[in-house]
Amino acid sequence: MPKKPGPIRLKRIYDASAEDDGARVLVERLWPRGFTKERAAVDLWLKEVAPSPELRQWFAHEPARWAEFRRRYRAELKRNEAGLQQLRAQLRQGTVTFVYAAHDPEYNSARLLKEYLEET
Protein backbone atom coordinates (compact mmCIF):
# COMPACT_ATOMS: atom_id res chain seq x y z
CA MET A 1 0.00 0.00 0.00
CA PRO A 2 1.50 3.39 -1.00
CA LYS A 3 2.33 5.79 1.78
CA LYS A 4 -0.10 8.72 2.08
CA PRO A 5 1.59 11.97 1.00
CA GLY A 6 2.66 14.28 3.79
CA PRO A 7 0.99 17.61 4.36
CA ILE A 8 2.04 20.68 2.40
CA ARG A 9 2.66 23.86 4.35
CA LEU A 10 3.37 27.36 3.10
CA LYS A 11 5.87 29.77 4.60
CA ARG A 12 7.43 33.02 3.51
CA ILE A 13 11.21 32.98 3.18
CA TYR A 14 11.27 35.84 5.70
CA ASP A 15 9.70 33.66 8.42
CA ALA A 16 12.02 31.61 10.61
CA SER A 17 12.38 27.93 9.82
CA ALA A 18 10.97 25.49 12.35
CA GLU A 19 11.62 21.86 13.23
CA ASP A 20 8.12 20.84 12.07
CA ASP A 21 8.59 22.36 8.57
CA GLY A 22 9.76 19.01 7.28
CA ALA A 23 11.53 19.37 3.93
CA ARG A 24 11.73 23.04 2.95
CA VAL A 25 11.39 23.53 -0.80
CA LEU A 26 11.92 26.95 -2.36
CA VAL A 27 9.32 27.21 -5.14
CA GLU A 28 10.45 30.52 -6.66
CA ARG A 29 12.00 31.09 -10.08
CA LEU A 30 14.50 33.60 -8.63
CA TRP A 31 16.60 33.21 -5.50
CA PRO A 32 15.33 35.68 -2.86
CA ARG A 33 17.51 38.77 -2.70
CA GLY A 34 19.67 39.09 0.39
CA PHE A 35 19.44 35.44 1.45
CA THR A 36 22.38 33.09 1.81
CA LYS A 37 21.81 29.36 1.54
CA GLU A 38 22.22 29.06 5.29
CA ARG A 39 19.76 31.84 6.08
CA ALA A 40 17.18 30.50 3.63
CA ALA A 41 17.39 27.06 5.27
CA VAL A 42 15.92 25.28 2.25
CA ASP A 43 16.57 21.66 1.43
CA LEU A 44 15.71 21.96 -2.24
CA TRP A 45 15.29 24.80 -4.73
CA LEU A 46 12.83 23.66 -7.36
CA LYS A 47 12.55 26.67 -9.66
CA GLU A 48 11.18 24.44 -12.43
CA VAL A 49 7.75 24.36 -10.75
CA ALA A 50 7.51 28.14 -10.40
CA PRO A 51 5.61 30.16 -13.00
CA SER A 52 7.52 30.89 -16.19
CA PRO A 53 9.39 34.20 -16.28
CA GLU A 54 6.87 35.55 -18.79
CA LEU A 55 3.87 34.61 -16.65
CA ARG A 56 5.50 35.90 -13.47
CA GLN A 57 6.25 39.25 -15.09
CA TRP A 58 2.77 39.52 -16.59
CA PHE A 59 1.08 38.83 -13.24
CA ALA A 60 3.25 41.32 -11.30
CA HIS A 61 1.30 40.38 -8.15
CA GLU A 62 -1.75 42.33 -9.34
CA PRO A 63 -4.83 40.86 -7.59
CA ALA A 64 -7.01 41.92 -10.53
CA ARG A 65 -5.06 39.43 -12.69
CA TRP A 66 -5.38 36.58 -10.20
CA ALA A 67 -8.07 34.53 -11.98
CA GLU A 68 -6.21 34.60 -15.29
CA PHE A 69 -2.86 33.97 -13.58
CA ARG A 70 -4.37 30.96 -11.84
CA ARG A 71 -5.65 29.55 -15.14
CA ARG A 72 -2.33 30.10 -16.95
CA TYR A 73 -0.18 28.74 -14.12
CA ARG A 74 -2.28 25.59 -13.83
CA ALA A 75 -1.83 25.09 -17.59
CA GLU A 76 1.93 25.38 -17.14
CA LEU A 77 1.84 22.86 -14.29
CA LYS A 78 -0.05 20.35 -16.45
CA ARG A 79 2.88 20.45 -18.87
CA ASN A 80 5.50 20.04 -16.12
CA GLU A 81 5.21 16.44 -15.01
CA ALA A 82 8.95 16.10 -14.28
CA GLY A 83 8.96 18.93 -11.76
CA LEU A 84 5.75 17.74 -10.15
CA GLN A 85 7.14 14.23 -9.81
CA GLN A 86 10.05 15.62 -7.78
CA LEU A 87 7.59 17.29 -5.42
CA ARG A 88 5.43 14.19 -5.13
CA ALA A 89 8.50 12.13 -4.27
CA GLN A 90 9.36 14.64 -1.55
CA LEU A 91 5.79 14.47 -0.22
CA ARG A 92 6.00 10.69 0.08
CA GLN A 93 8.77 11.28 2.64
CA GLY A 94 6.56 13.41 4.92
CA THR A 95 5.76 17.05 5.57
CA VAL A 96 6.91 19.56 2.96
CA THR A 97 6.94 23.33 3.38
CA PHE A 98 6.80 25.38 0.21
CA VAL A 99 8.94 28.45 0.82
CA TYR A 100 8.05 31.55 -1.19
CA ALA A 101 9.13 35.19 -1.35
CA ALA A 102 5.89 36.96 -2.31
CA HIS A 103 4.59 39.46 0.23
CA ASP A 104 0.94 38.54 -0.26
CA PRO A 105 -0.02 35.25 1.46
CA GLU A 106 -3.22 34.97 -0.58
CA TYR A 107 -2.15 35.86 -4.12
CA ASN A 108 0.99 33.83 -4.75
CA SER A 109 2.08 30.90 -6.85
CA ALA A 110 3.09 28.71 -3.88
CA ARG A 111 -0.52 28.66 -2.76
CA LEU A 112 -1.67 27.65 -6.25
CA LEU A 113 1.00 24.95 -6.45
CA LYS A 114 -0.18 23.52 -3.13
CA GLU A 115 -3.80 23.50 -4.32
CA TYR A 116 -2.84 21.88 -7.61
CA LEU A 117 -0.90 19.06 -5.93
CA GLU A 118 -3.68 18.42 -3.41
CA GLU A 119 -6.21 18.14 -6.26
CA THR A 120 -4.20 15.90 -8.60
Image (spheres, rainbow, N blue to C red):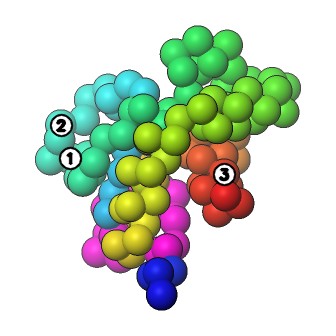
Residue segment shown in magenta: 5-22
**At label 2, which amino acid type do we have?**
Thr
Residue 94 shows up from this direction: yes
- Where is residue 57 shown, x and y percent of the image? 60, 13
State whether residue 118 is above or below residue 73: below
Q: CA distance from mark 3 to mark 2?
A: 29 Å
Identified by mark 1, the residue type is Arg
| Residue ID at (64%, 62%) | 118
Q: Residues within 10 Å of mark 3 (few under 14, many from 20)?
A: some
Residue at (24, 53) in percent of width and height: 43
Task: Give the crowd class for mark 2: few <14, some 14-19, many >=20 residues within 10 Å.
Answer: few
Q: Residue 19 in magenta?
A: yes
- Which type of secondary structure does the marked residue at label 3 adopt? helix
Q: Residues within 10 Å of mark 1 (few under 14, many from 20)?
A: few
Q: Is residue 81 above or below residue 20?
A: above
> Residue 72, position in %: x, y?
73, 27
Q: Mark 3 and mark 1 in contact? Answer it, CB < 8 Å.
A: no
The residue beneath circle 2 is 36
Q: Nearer the viewer, residue 79 or 96?
A: 79
Q: Earlier in the sequence, mark 3 or mark 2?
A: 2
Q: Secondary structure at mark 2?
A: loop
Query: Taking 106 as reference, is 79 above or below it?
Result: above
* Sequence-first tag of 3 and 1: 1
Seen at 52% across and 58% down, the residue is 10
Q: Secondary structure at mark 1?
A: helix
> Circle 3 sits on which residue?
116
Label 3 is placed on what type of residue?
Answer: Tyr
Task: Name the residue carrying label 1.
Answer: 39
Q: Are marks 2 and 1 in contact (CB under 8 Å)?
A: yes
